[in-house]
Image (tube, coloured by chain):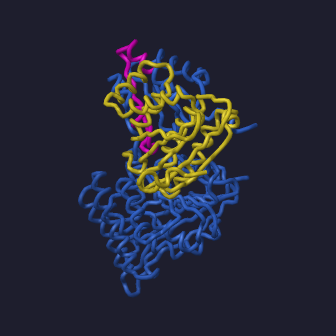
Amino acid sequence: MNPYLLPRFETQYDINDQEFSISGIVRPQSIDELAPSIALLKDSIDRVRGILYVNIRRLTQMNNTAFHAFSRVIIDACRARPDLKFVVITSSVVGWTTRKFGRLSGIEPNITVEEYDSEFYPGQTFLEEGGFIPILRTQTKLTWRHERTILPRHGMQPGIVMADICCGIGDFAVLVQREFEPSRIVALDHARTSLAYARNVAAEFDIKGIEYTYGDASEMLLEDDQFDLVTCRHSLQVFNNPELILKELFRICKPGGRVYITNEKNSHCLGEPRADSIQWTYNEVAKLWAHFQMDIELGPKSRRYLIEAGFEDIRVESFMVTNHDGDPQDFADVIAAWENVYAGEMATKRGDPPAFIRRFRQGFQDHIFAALHPKGYAGWPIWVASGRKPL
Amino acid sequence: MNIASQSVGGEAVFKPMIQIDLEVKAFLSAWLHCDQISTYSARMISHNRSDSVRHSNLFSSAFNELLEVAFRARHSSGEIACRVSRRGETDRIELTFPCMPEERQFYEEAILQIAGSEARERYLNSVSGDLAPSREVVLLELAIDYNATFRLDEAGADTITLVVDLPLEGLPN
């Protein structure tokens, strides 16, 4: 069947949430094409009490014909039922929706527009503050020593079209571009400060061919089946619903292409001397992340996640970043940054007592001690996994 | 074809990005052509914008409305030309299509109204009162939501060129 003849939008009503949602591309020639959806909206209005949520987060395009049709129904309902309020939920990712639907509140005060944003991932805010940027660069420097030889085994090669989802400050994309010369890289993140940093670096160093874009990894504007390789590093472990992200990575990957993910298992961080103290602290790190609905132990679970997302030809390997990867001080700096975020911010926010935080900090200090000790060894293990999207 | 936007009356140069010409008959053969042309053009010109995906989405949205206006005019013959050019942060769409004298007058008046002080009110009145948007309201919406500016150029006998400047790079999120 001609794919252009298929309906490219969907409307739904969820009675439990009192939510009417419109998603996809809505560009009808005539209002008649919308008749079933308009009927559903009217029916939803008849059934609802108090507030009707109109969810347009996944609405990527809507022409004025459709906008007028849906708006008229909502405005008429406001006038017929003053008891009813409408809350339109837009996405900060789709540039036009908040502005366009925001006009409706100027017509009817019972219509309000709320923009959905990154606050839905509360744990991440710890890791995305501007002060963390230097340490993210150091982390990438340490992991790149390993990944540059690992990546070709997972589909990386010159000339491919790739996406780096949750690209952070974009340093991995830059390293990939220099080393492997893909024909195009789309690098997406939902932290505007990180993207601004990435764009500045690209401009300063005259780096071409990387498109930094603002987006939500769980519902991207990127189209289906576009990329030969989709990378998503150290990020599934940060989301409370990694399956949702993997579904999107699967969607944008070309059939036959691969999705490449890296994640940690922090409780396996190790060091000598002072192994016991180090071990205790990183076990506690895992519990702390779980408290904030993040899974820093996700690494070895990658295979299961990829299989359950529908990938085939799963390849998994692991590597250990150590204090012997270049300057031991780099490793120590990373651990010091972890201590600041985990013991300084997250444990405090969880309400941990001072005695716990003291012991918690000591493990990081001991890890640094091991890293800088002339006979010491300190490690940070990372799991790499990739899967092929079936043809 | 002459790219009129390159230098007009001392105006700084708009560099051509993409041009699509087609017979009106072919264009009118499927409504989906509006979507396809706007989406394709948006993708092609957006890769080097600061946020390629966002720019592409916004540009496609605005361009599609203009194409739908041309489609609804439903002239039976002639050619339609879609040219996209760029100067700095502004993208320019030049849409040349068949147009009778009375239609030309309509566009001239519509552009005057867009520049008027009551543009926003006219737009809101239409959203709350009209079942379907008129051509004028579609153009008004582009001015209000996309900061678009409009101009009409002479393109030849019974044709007009609608020149629309879209400063999407500077559009607040």
Q: Residue at x 40, y 47 (%)?
A: A118
A164 sits to left or right of B87: right
> Residue A274 in magenta?
no
Residue B156: x %, y % from top left: 57, 39
From the image, state the color of chain B.
Answer: yellow
Above or below residue A75? Residue A305 is below
Tell which residue pokes out farthest to the bottom in this image: A374
Above or below residue A197? Residue A31 is above
Closer to us: A127 or A290: A127
Tell which residue pokes out farthest to the left in this image: A354
Closer to us: A34 or A288: A34
Q: Residue at x 55, y 54 (%)?
A: B17
Above or below residue A388? Residue A36 is above
Q: Residue at x 45, y 31 (%)?
A: B108
Closer to us: A144 or A267: A144
Residue B166: x %, y % from top left: 44, 45
Q: Residue at x 53, y 49 (%)?
A: B84
> Residue A90 in magenta?
yes
Tell which residue pokes out farthest to the right in this image: A1
Magenta stretch in the rendered image: A73-101
Is residue B84 shown to the viewer in this render? yes
From the image, state the color of chain A.
Answer: blue
Residue A332: x %, y % from top left: 36, 75
Quadrant location of the N terminus of chain A? Answer: top right
Tell which residue pokes out farthest to the front in this image: B157
Residue B8: x %, y % from top left: 45, 51
A121 sits to left or right of A300: left
**Image quadrant where residue A71 sits:** top left
Q: Say how many tags the image has.
A: 0
**Image quadrant where residue A112 sits:** top left
Is residue A5 shown to the viewer in this render? no
